[in-house]
Image (cartoon, rainbow, N blue to C red):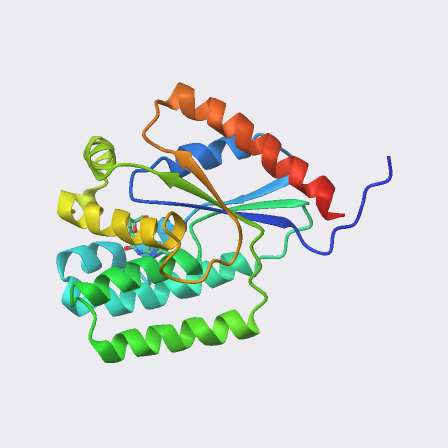
Amino acid sequence: PTCKLYKRPFTVCIEGNIGSGKTTFLSHFKQFDNTTVLQEPVELWRNVAGINLLELMYTDPKRYSFLFQSYVQLTMLQLHTYKSAMPYKIMERSVFSARCFIENMKRTKLLEDVEVVVLEDWYDWCIQNANIVTDLIVYLRTSPEVVYNRMKTRARKEENSVSLEYLHQLHNIHDEWLYDQTLFNLPAPVLVIDGNKSLEEMVIQFENCKNLIFNRKEEKN
Ligand SMILES: Cc1cc2cn([C@H]3C[C@H](O)[C@@H](CO)O3)c(=O)nc2[nH]1
């Protein structure tokens, strides 16, 4: 069959709380040679000219939340604008979910109002000027208690101070955005997956999701 040239990849963003299973879910897409998988650049955030910005953000959030979110926004934009010749591109989180973290930091006063304005002005400019297109959002919806236990088991050192309350806050904002859909306007349709399921059950959900995503492409051309 002729190989069709796509003007751009069908782009999926995987969204969800800390520990909701995004990385596990993404790893299933790595098996396909027609898909570019872009994981969250945590390693970049851990080494900014030798500085662990993720650690600083968690140890001194008042002082470092703005700086951290500012760098997160840049690294996510780099992934959104990454040129891929593949027909599919799957990203872990997005500049859209960056707004969830910023919203939480705003509500909990970790960011000054003026810091929020600057971050939002950057975001607005990027949305208008960088071609950030998303075709589908997959929301791994989990209960804070489940992700708290997973986070503790994974034991990422920078997260050892993250509280269940913080995960509740992030869960509520993700739900407002992607489940109730009352927060920000949605850049793409949302597919909600139950992230509380076991890995085996998640794989089944993944299979259904894969068929849905790859089938969608046929509609597109
Ligand atoms: C877009 C975006 C991703 C992201 C991740 N994080 C944190 C949550 C986790 O502890 C770690 C890896 O996701 O980074 C954050 O504070 N703000 C973020 N904004």
Of residues 41 and 9, which is closer to you in this image? 9
Residue 52 visible in rendering: no
At 41% from the left edge and 32% from the top edge, which residue is drawn? 24
Position above or below: 131 against 44: below
Q: Which residue is pictured at 36% across the width and 33% down the height? A: 195
How far across and how far down the image is residue 181, in percent? 40, 54
- How far across and how far down the image is residue 17, in percent? 31, 44
Q: Quadrant of residue 47?
A: bottom left
Q: How many marks?
A: 0
On the rendered structure, is 218 left or right of 117? right
Q: Is residue 140 visible?
A: yes
Q: Position of residue 68 (x, y in %)?
A: 29, 63
Name the residue rendered at 14%, 47% in the picture. 165
Q: Please name the residue shown 22% across and 63% down the image.
A: 105
Relative horizontal placement of residue 10, taking residue 20 as reference (left or right): right
Figure quadrant of residue 95 = bottom left
